[in-house]
Image (tube, rainbow, N blue to C red):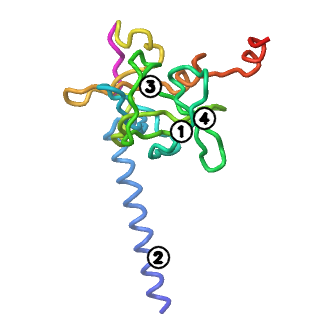
Amino acid sequence: MQDNQGYEIDQILQEMRSDYWRTLEAVEEDGGGTKAEYLIIRCGNNRYGLLAASCREVLKLPHLVRVPRLPEHLRGIFNLRGEIVAVTDICPLLGQSGQTVHESFRLVIVEEGAIKTALLVEVVEGLIEVSEEQIEPLAEGAGAGARDLFFGKVVQGEEALVLLSLDKLLGRPELIVDQKEQAEGKR
């Protein structure tokens, strides 16, 4: 019985060595460049990529509670397992007109640093793995007023996927609601 166990261990070790060497060869073939996954979303006719590491979950559109006197891009709030989360329509922030919300819309819960919000998107297409070599710079004049939010694009066939910088998007002054300033403004 002990001889069988020894054979199994030798076989397992040999398989592990083979897997190790195959993995090293695959990395060398890829050029060793770093890769990252992006969540593909659609806003209007444009496709955008969000770093998947910052996306926590995708939800069907719940009932939103509208908060008076908030800007157009803040569509409301909802309760996410006991936590109140603001819903942000990114289209106005990207220089597009606001969207008419339908039941087919989705919320992408994103978190970057201390800020957590739900991005209102028309469609979530899925995930894509992108290597650094695939990312191209944007053409001059592309993106108009929201150019600072983009850090590159990936061309896929005839369509381009514009990569969004979540830290810059969530750090925009339009997304920060300072209760202290609002209270002082009422006086």
Q: Which mark is residue 9?
A: 2
Near mark 1 (Cα within 10 A), the count class, few <14, some 14-19 or many ≥20, is few
Judge whether 125 appears above or below 135 on screen: below
Q: Which image quadrant: the C terminus? A: top right
Please indicate whether residue 64 sits to the left or right of residue 28 in the image: right
> Which of the two residues, 187 or 43, is positioned nearer the viewer here?
187
Snapshot quadrant of residue 112: top right
Q: Nearer the viewer, mark 1 or mark 2?
A: 1
Amino acid type, label 1: Leu
Near mark 4 (Cα within 10 A), the count class, few <14, some 14-19 or many ≥20, is some
Marks 1 and 2, the one that precedes in the sequence: 2
Was residue 135 drawn as part of the magenta stretch in this picture? yes
Please indicate whether residue 185 sits to the left or right of residue 133 in the image: right
Q: Which mark is residue 64?
A: 1
Percent coordinates x, y for residue 156 in the rendering: 25, 30
* SS at badge 1: loop
- Mark 2 and mark 3 in contact? Answer it, CB < 8 Å: no
Tell me the CA gap for discs 1 and 2: 57 Å
* SS at badge 3: strand
> Which of the two residues, 21 or 54, is positioned nearer the viewer here?
54
Tell me the CA gap for discs 1 and 4: 16 Å
Amino acid type, label 3: Leu
Near mark 3 (Cα within 10 A), the count class, few <14, some 14-19 or many ≥20, is many
Marks 3 and 4, the one that precedes in the sequence: 4
Tell me the CA gap for discs 2 and 3: 48 Å
Q: Nearer the viewer, mark 1 or mark 3?
A: 1
Q: Which mark is residue 116?
A: 4
Mark 3 highlights which residue? 164
Q: Nearer the viewer, mark 4 or mark 2?
A: 4
Residue at 38% across / 51% down in the picture?
23
* SS at badge 4: strand
The stretch in magenta equals 134-140
